[in-house]
Amino acid sequence: MSAAPIAVSSSDDGTVVTVTLDRPEKRNALALDVMVELTRVLDEVGRSDALGVVLAANGPVFSAGHNFGDMLGADLDDARHLFEVCTTMMDTVQSIPQPVIARVHALATAAGCQLVASCDLAVAADTAGFALPGGKGGLFCHTPVVAVARNVGRKRALEMALTGDPIDAATALEWGLVNRVVPADELDAAVDDLMARVIRGSAASKGLGKRAFYAQVGLDQPAAYALAMEVMARSAMLPDAQEGFAAFLEKRHPHFESAPGDADSIDVTRG
């Protein structure tokens, strides 16, 4: 039996959980069991009081994407199930209230690149690379390009998907696939710095803000504003918002006590 495909660790104070793809001998391929386990772990962390999540990987490759062994000889129902599980995993990254930062030290291809694109933020080492290699093979990267196009735009996403050629970390930064690129020996410090700044403030407000962002970002502007206005009005009623207003007016530091999911009852599906 293979070792557990996912390793989980927490910072000393429990505020940040690191979820690590841990099958380096398989190039951290997103086999069916890996995707099921990663979804389970993320869902569990999402219901915890942790404030942030780092998604990392062990070994020479961040993730090589789908395991072709899951698809060779599969019937249509099996193939549909595989991509439904994958989509659920990607959606879970974005639906949990905590910000998720991808820590990318090496090559991320196909669904591995999709996973990076699905994270809220990403920090890459200068040794990282990104590719949608289906354009060179027999199966176009249909689902990976959904996430990648929402990061880099149509022309660049299609260049990646049609050519299959990898881009380096500097190009990924220029195109908007990652937030920053640093020397490999500075990767952990850069991730820690970004996470520290991302998780300060109200956890409930950030959790709601993340959900509302993904709900509105694909809408046209009038619909996006209608949704955002309603969510912001309801957000202003939250205890942390009222504490923030009072602290500002009283010229003191605010004291927030919320957990990331404390605003889950606010509907972000309509304006």
Image (cartoon, rainbow, N blue to C red):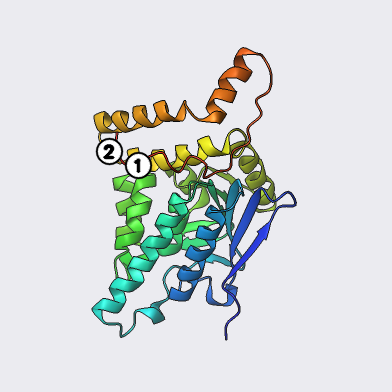
Q: Quadrant of the N terminus?
A: bottom right
Dot 2 alpha-carbon crowd within 10 angstroms: few under 14, some 14 to 19, many 20 or more: few
Q: Nearer the viewer, residue 5 or 51?
A: 51
State the image coordinates of residue 64 (x, y, percent, origin top left): 47, 68
Instruction: Look at the image and tell me whether residue 214 can be seen.
Output: yes
Label number found at residue 259: none
Point 56% across, 60% down: residue: 106
State the image coordinates of residue 81 (x, y, percent, origin top left): 32, 72
**Dividing the picture into quarters, in which one does residue 23 lie?**
bottom right
The image shows residue 96, relative to residue 19, as above or below, that is: above
Query: CA separation, marks 1 and 2?
Result: 8 Å
Residue tagged 1: 215
Residue tagged 2: 219
State the image coordinates of residue 216 (x, y, percent, origin top left): 33, 38
Instruction: Look at the image and tell me whether residue 138 can be seen.
Output: no
Q: Quadrant of the C terminus?
A: top left
Q: Is residue 150 left or right of residue 204?
A: left
Q: Nearer the viewer, residue 208 or 6?
A: 208
Point 46% across, 48% down: residue: 172
Kind of residue indicated by mark 1 = Ala
Kind of residue indicated by mark 2 = Leu
State the image coordinates of residue 116 (x, y, percent, origin top left): 47, 55
Point 49% across, 72% down: residue: 34
Point 24% across, 78% down: residue: 76
The image shows residue 240, relative to residue 208, as above or below, that is: above
Tell which tag, 1 or 2, sits nearer the viewer: 1
Q: In this view, does 120 lie to the left or right of 148?
A: right
Callout 2 secondary element: loop
